[in-house]
Image (tube, rainbow, N blue to C red):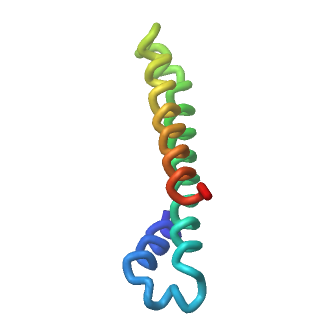
């Protein structure tokens, strides 16, 4: 997460980072690392939903919706990042 923050600072103040890496590459790297970090956060959330407490507390269709919604958001975010930074 600290690397992501440093990458964001380099995008805010690109004067020093431009000497070492192109700005386009820095933006792509920042977007990719953000997507990876968000994927790990969703994986942590879904893993927490598999706990005994959560399964006992949330039952039926609500449990499936709680699992599907973060994955749907992750899919939409990945599509947006791919379209914005990696489409030709």
The residue furthest left is: 12
Q: Quadrant of the C terminus?
A: bottom right
Q: Looking at the image, is 50 positioned above or below residue 10?
A: above
The residue furthest top is: 60
Q: Looking at the image, is 27 positioned above or below residue 68?
A: below
The residue depicted at 50 percent of the width and 27 percent of the height is 49
Q: Residue 68: x percent and y percent?
A: 50, 25
Q: Pick whichever, 64 or 78, lies toward us.
A: 78
Report whether 59 appears left or right of 32.
left
Total labels drawn:
0
Q: Looking at the image, is 56 positioned above or below residue 71?
A: above
Q: Pick whichever, 27 or 45, lies toward us.
A: 27
Q: Residue 33: x percent and y percent?
A: 56, 60
Q: Residue 48: x percent and y percent?
A: 51, 32
Tell me the quarter of the picture where residue 19 sits.
bottom right
The residue depicted at 49 percent of the width and 47 percent of the height is 80
Q: Pick whichever, 72 or 53, lies toward us.
A: 72
Tell me the quarter of the picture where residue 75 sits.
top right
The residue depicted at 44 percent of the width and 83 percent of the height is 14
Report whether 15 appears left or right of 75.
left
Q: Residue 51: x percent and y percent?
A: 53, 25
């Amino acid at each position: 997460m600290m690397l992501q923050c440093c990458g964001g600072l380099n995008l805010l103040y690109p004067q020093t980072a431009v000497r070492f890496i192109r700005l386009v590459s820095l933006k792509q790297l920042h977007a990719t690392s953000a997507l990876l970090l968000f994927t790990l956060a969703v994986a942590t959330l879904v893993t927490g939903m598999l706990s005994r407490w959560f399964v006992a507390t949330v039952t039926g269709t609500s449990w499936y919706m709680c699992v599907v919604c973060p994955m749907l958001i992750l899919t939409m975010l990945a599509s947006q990042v791919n379209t914005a930074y990696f489409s030709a």
